[in-house]
Amino acid sequence: MIKLKYSPEYDFAVKYRNSPEHQRTFCVIGYCIFAGLSDTTIAYRHKLYPGQVKAIRELFFDFSSAPTDVVARSAYFTQLADNQIISDVDRRYFKIIGSLGELGLKAGVDPACLSLDEKDKLNAYLADSMVDNVASLYFSIEGKKDALAYNGVINNLASFFIKKEEINYYRSKVRNLDASTSRIVNERKDYDTGLQEEDKLAMELISKLALKDNPPPEYKLITELN
């Protein structure tokens, strides 16, 4: 005799999966699970109970046996898409999440919310994706027309990397300038701590006079001189 026990969490997970109203949310929960977020974090974001998220993970998004190798993982999700177990949109999300983690999910939802460091990581990933696409294009060349189009793409790609290095160069200059400014400010603070109160008042007065807008000087005419 088989003894079955009713689980409200599993019942919820099945109904949630089959509900048209929650179809997209269900997919996003799967992305979050693949990104490594905890059941508690996912439950808080989607206003669910951790036990309900756990049931969804165990029934539909158990990635414990999924391959970790990049090539094998790509083939794994491509096969799931070919078998119509996941959509092609899901496959692309799983690909970028596999490379960038939760950052890949955030980039697909709202790139404007990313920090500067996160945007740098995303841009680096997109640059690598461009190289991958160019490599695929190279293997598809079949004639002179394709070769000319490929050369144009290569030139654009080179321009992209040149601009990228220019941006990194100017960012480095800005960081060095900020560091120099901070060092000067800190040195002045250290210098000010060794001054007497009268000396500090005198320095403040000199600073105010130096910043004051003085009227242009007036010169007498020759006829006005004695």
Image (cartoon, grey):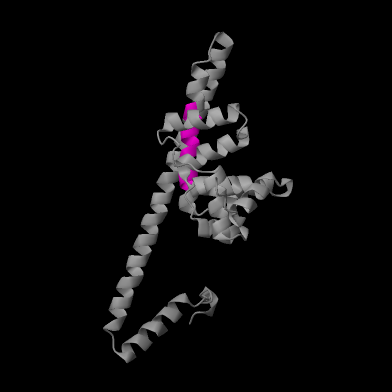
Q: Quadrant of residue 9?
A: bottom right
Up/down of 112 relative to 138, above or below: below
In the rendered image, residue 90, in percent from the top left (x then y), is placed at 59, 38
Q: Residue at x 45, y 81 (%)?
A: 208
As for residue 124 lying within the magenta part, the answer is yes
The prevailing secondary structure element of the residues shown in magenta is helix
Q: Is residue 142 left or right of residue 70?
A: right
Quadrant of the rendering where the N terminus is positioned: top right
Q: Is residue 107 visible?
A: no
In the rendered image, residue 201, in percent from the top left (x then y), is placed at 37, 88
Closer to the camera in the image, 102 or 219: 102
The extreme bottom residue here reads 198
In the rendered image, residue 18, in percent from the top left (x then y), is placed at 69, 44
Q: Is residue 5 visible?
A: yes
Up/down of 112 relative to 207, above or below: above
How many labels, in total? 0
In the rendered image, residue 108, in percent from the top left (x then y), is placed at 59, 45
Q: Is residue 193 left or right of residue 207?
A: left
The extreme top residue here reads 143
Magenta residues span: 120-132
